[in-house]
Structure formats: C-alpha cells, structure tokens
Image: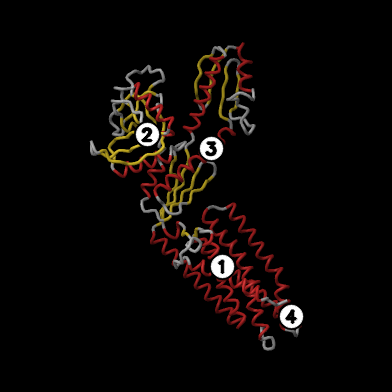
Amino acid sequence: MLYFSKLRIILISLITAFFIILTLSNFLNFGGSLLSKKINLGLDLQGGSYLLLEIDNNPVELQKLQNTSTDIRNFLNNEKIKFTDLRISNKSIIFNIDQKDKDTVESFFTDKNSEINPYYTKYSSHQFDLTMLSDEFQLKLSEYGLIEIKISSQDQAIEIVRRRVDEVGTNEPNILKRGNDRILVELPGLDDPMRIKSLLGKTANLSFRFITQNDNDTFGAETLKFDDDINEALVSKRIILSGENLLDAQPNMNTQTNETVVSFKLDRVGAKRFGKATSDGIGKQLAIVLDGIIVSAPVIRDAIVSGSGQISGNFTFQSATDLALLLRSGALPAPLNIIEERSVGPDLGQDSINAGIISLLIGFALVIIFMLYKYKIFGLIANITLLINLFFLIGILTLFEATLTLPGIAGIILTVGMAVDANVLIFERIKEELKDEKNNIIAFDTGYVKSKTAIIDANVTTLIAAVILFFMGSGPVKGFSVTLAVGIFTTLFSVYFIARMLTSLYVVKNKEKINLI
C-alpha cells in the first residue's frame, strides 16, 4: 500500500542526509576521514598528460635465448657431447651435433623434468618450438613463449612505471594495461610533462663492471661510451653488481669536491660482493654503467666494505634526483617507447568543466519547468526527487573517490533524463488508474505497482549496455558507463523510495482534492 512507517521515513531521511553531506564535502571541508573524500577530476577536466607506451620486448627475447643457450652449452659439456657452431641467429638457437648423440639431446628437450625443456612449463605449455634436421637443432620461441614474455614484461613494467610516477608526486595517476605490450599513463594536473617522459623512457639498468685493457677477457668485453658521448672504454662483460642489489639511492653533495652525487646503499648480498670486488680490484677502474652508458669510472683506492658508495658525474641536483629516483624504483625489464602523447592545458580543462556544468543546468532547468507545467505539485515532487538523485549519484562517486571525466558528466546528464522518464511513466499510469478508481490512495498505489515492471525493464536493458561499454570500452567510455550504471541504481532508489514517500505523505493528507488529469 501507499504507506511508509515512521521508522522507514527516518531511515530514508538519514540515508538522504548522509549522501547530501558526502556530496557537499567536495566543496566544503567537514573534516574526518570519510567526509574528506572527494571526486577526482580526470585528465580532460583538470589538464595533464596522456602517454601511450609500447614495450620493446626484443632485448628480453634475446636475453631469454642467451640464457637458454648457456644452459644448453652447460648440458652438452656435462654430458661430454661434441657440438659445433652454437649460436643465436634470427631469434633462434642453432647448434650441430654428431648423429649418434641425437637421441640423447632430443630426450633432454622432451623430458618434463628438464629445466629448459621446450615443451614444459608450470602451465604445461611449450616455450620453444624445436626443429631437428639431420645433425642440426633449432630452437625458436613459440607463440606461447612470446606471449608469456610479453605478459611478464608488461606486469613488471607497470609496477616500475607506477613507482616512478608515485616518486614524482603526480596526483591520482591512471596507469592501465593496453593489450599485452602497451601501457596507458594518464597524469592529471602534471606541470612538467618533459620530465616524466624522460623518466619513463629510461630503462635504468645499472651495473658495476671493471674497465679492462684485454680484448680476450675471460668473460668477454665490449666498448662503451661515456656520458659525454666522446670518450669510450673497453669494459668487461662480467657484472660485479647490478641495480637489484640497491636498497636506497639519494641525491647528495660531496663536500670535498663540491659536486652533486648520488649516494647509494646496498643490501647484504650486494655489500659482500662489492667489498670482495673492491678488495681484489684496488688500482683498477670500476665503470658504473647505466643503460649501456658509462656514467663514471673511478679508480678503486681502498676496499669498500660498508655497503654504501657514491655515483659521481656531471650531475645537476635535478638530474641527480631523477637518477636516484630511477635507481630506487628499479630497472624496467625492457625499453619503453612513447607512441602516442596528448596534453590538455588547465584552461581547456576548465572550459570543459564550465561547458559540462552549463549543459547540466540547462537540461535540469528545462526538465523542472516541464514537470511543473505538466504535473503541478507532483511535478514538484519529481523535481525534488531529481535533485536528491543527483546528490545520491555524486555522493556514491565521492565515496569511492571516482575520477570524473567529461563523458562522466554526460552520464550524469543522461541520468537526469532517465529519472524523469521513470516519474513520467508512473504519473501517466496513475492517470489511467484514476479514470476507473474512485479511491485516490488505491489509484496511486496501483500506478506505482503496475509501472514498476516497465521501469525496471527499461533500466535493466540500459544497465546491460553500460556493463558492455565498461568491459569493451577504453578510459573515457568506461567513465561514462560507470556514471550511467550508478545513475540507474540511484534513479530506482529515488523513484521508489524518495518520490513514493513524498507522494504518499501528500496523497494521504490531501486524498479528497487530488487532480492529476
């Protein structure tokens, strides 16, 4: 029946008051952890940078092949199997053996207990495709192996990108996967996009290696350039220490030389390795290599056993701060390339906000005028409900600290129309009931009951569309779908609790003088 108990009225009033206060917390400071929540403005509303990064997995694939070729070499040596021409060519591992050893080598690759078996991983899929000719073996990364590398690289890269962005102090960044080799980075309110681009574009692969004069170094050697891009040195491929052993890195000032340096601390394993290397290498130059470039190459004067040291170079305080940030956040598993970049200025963002607010106010005003003209006092009830519905919608978005975008504002405007549509269906149904039913209370109650099915069906179909948009769409589309979905639930609550309660209170008091026709 068209009846609300006092307890039900009080409960609805408290819920309404809570969401009104929660909505107002976006504009007023009430204090407290719950009431300090606010809606975050998206990139298109407050300005900032949009970057689409693509992971270059070629170095990771090459590293995988190199590690596997080392395992193969060790196996063949341990089994005393003669082999020739073990090499990596066209992203394949190729080697030749005697025909008599073919079965032994083949069993090594097909044995599930083998560490590098190409047909077995923890997911029971093969990482390599094996091709056997008369005396030649060829291993190539399979499609599954390539996908596994991409997924692993993407997961690691997202974590490190997030650390780097958080270190810069960007407010509410949005970092998302795109496919299996791309990362979307949205940075609202970013003041210095060039700096973040520089930080995200560096792999930050740090290593400490000795400079050698011998081309025939046991571990091999390669020529690397210094960061001045002029001088170069022959550096051993043996890595004494890597960035994985760093506990912390901070910019600092060397009081003796009055230059900016990066001070670092090593973990226990790193400190032990560094102490032994510097003890054995007194008098040698130790190259500090970052992304294949020699940052500095100091001569070791004494053993460094404290587990801490300094990286010197031609640093400004800003560049030292950025290097320390990169080292703290860790090295990227693969290089990142910026394939798409967009910037939105704060003025354009404010224009978007103003346009959205004006659109909402115009639409809201026209709806209010129409409802008052068409349904008089019940139009007023519908308008009050509409306003409360907006408080519910914005309050829920505030509660979850959602990010509001321009499409999100469009979703709010659409919610206004949907909420009115539900009230129009109810009032028109009540008109039909009043033609045959003399008891106004029964007519109103029947109108609400009989219109419920049509209203729920209409909102459920819209909700299905919103869900599909959320899972199939990208960032802006997701924002629209979330706002639309939340608006559907707030609309149903507002219509069947707020509007029905207000209608009930009015009809019960004025049951003899109601005219909706």
Distance between the alpha carbons at the discs numbered 1 and 2: 53 Å
Q: Secondary structure at mark 4?
A: helix
Residue 72: % across, % down: 54, 20
Asked if disc 1 and disc 4 are in contact, CB closer than 8 Å, the reply is no
Distance between the alpha carbons at the discs numbered 1 and 3: 41 Å
Tag of residue 152: 3
Residue identifier under label 2: 290
Residue that appears at 31% across and 34% down? 227
Residue that appears at 61% across and 58% down? 466
Residue that appears at 43% across and 38% down? 330
Distance between the alpha carbons at the discs numbered 2 and 4: 80 Å
Tag of residue 199: none
Asked if disc 4 and disc 3 are in contact, CB closer than 8 Å, the reply is no
Distance between the alpha carbons at the discs numbered 2 and 3: 23 Å
Q: Amino acid at mark 1?
A: Phe
Residue 461: % across, % down: 66, 61
In front: label 1 or label 3? 1
Q: Say which label, 2 or 3, has the lower sequence index.
A: 3
Q: Amino acid at mark 4?
A: Ile
**Looking at the image, which is closer to me, 167 or 345?**
167
Circle 1 Cα neighbour tier, 10 Å, few/some/many (<14 / 14–19 / ≥20): many
